[in-house]
Image (cartoon, helix red, strand yellow):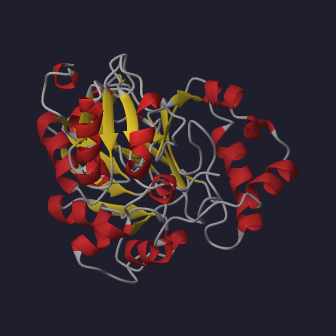
Amino acid sequence: MDTLALGASPEITAEELAAVLGTGDAPQLVDVREPEEFEAWALAGARNLPLSHLATALDQVARDREVVVICASGARSARAVHAMRAAGIPALNLTGGMLAWSAVYDTAVLELGAARVVQVRRRGKGCLSYVVGAGSEAFVVDPSLDVERYLGIAERAGWRITRVFDTHLHADHLSGVRALAGATGASVHLNPADGYRFPFEPLDDNQWFSLGGQEHFGVTVLTAPGHTPGSTLYEVGGRALLTGDTLFVDGVGRPDLADQAEAFAHDLYRSLHAKVIAMPVDVTVLPAHYGDSVVVAPNVVVGASLGELRSSLDQLAWSEDRFVDWAAHRARPRPPHYHEIVRINNGAASAPLEDARRLELGPNRCAA
């Protein structure tokens, strides 16, 4: 990629970086923030070389491969780039730093015959949402507040967004279901078990919604308590399963966010076995998040067949007792501002848009 050449501009945008990560052109990533900042939130694969110690650490950076330097907003990393380039290291500054990275989206497409699933990836959060379209109609699942992303996808495909869903009451990022419904006139569909306090159309287990005017194609609702009481899966045409935070490609959802870890872990185990594992092994699992261990490549969906996950995730083969003991007693930090985000998402509180956006900065912490 030309922007990564030594003689080019010393800057690279977050969008340009997203386009090369997960490919053979991926650069080295060096984060020059202090260790506590790095531990709280960083790009997957980045090395932490704090600016305060960089002068004595330059020999740890390879000179035969491009380097993208990262900080919170781009100021410290600009100073580090100057020092690196003076030492002959082909370094570029990530424009806007982690703040810019938090706003980057890209997409990947899964074709399902008469339908198409567009996976919308919010790269800084590891959040995944979906536009499921057929004919002239589309449903959206787990939208963020950046509703223009979904409006643009639908417009380019010739779809009208008619229904908006969440897979559960989100705890680490803000839901855009109400904002998107307001922008499109779509109906909002949610599981009442999660205690929402605003008007919506309640979902029932095994409820079916036709899509695109096709009599035999649509989306089936599968209630799956565990991560939250109202966690819900969406089966698309019998070929894909939107699993929310119930099942990821690198793990399972955490059951401890509501202070009922053991009871929720039992529910999660039963949901996984009754609603997920019983499905055909060739069903494609499409989660609502991904972790640092997952390589995200341009134009390739983050997902896996159920058969692949049954082979790679040991937890899916454990007994209920072993699973509950493991899931209920893993000590992990809760998402920052967890209670405030839940109150906004369930309609119990509100906040100015910019204040609300600041609440959700940081990584995904919804996996066990």
- Residue 190 lies, in percent from the top left, at 43, 63
Q: How many numbered circles are shown?
A: 0
Q: Residue drawn 37% across and 61% down?
A: 361
Q: Residue drawn 46% across and 73% down?
A: 337
- Residue 70 lies, in percent from the top left, at 33, 44
Q: Residue drawn 18% across and 38% down?
A: 136
Is the N terminus in the top left, top right, bottom left or bottom right quadrant?
Answer: top left
Nearest to the observer: residue 236 or residue 15 = 15
Q: Is residue 59 left or right of residue 228?
A: left
- Residue 252 lies, in percent from the top left, at 63, 46
- Residue sticking out furthest to the front: 56
Nearest to the observer: residue 225 or residue 208 = 225
Nearest to the observer: residue 78 or residue 188 = 78
Name which quarter of the figure residue 68 lies in: top left
Name which quarter of the figure residue 110 lies in: top left
Work out whether residue 212 can be spotted: no
Work out whether residue 311 can be spotted: yes
- Residue 327 lies, in percent from the top left, at 74, 55
Image height of 169 relative to 205, above or below: below
Q: Residue drawn 65% across and 52% down?
A: 368
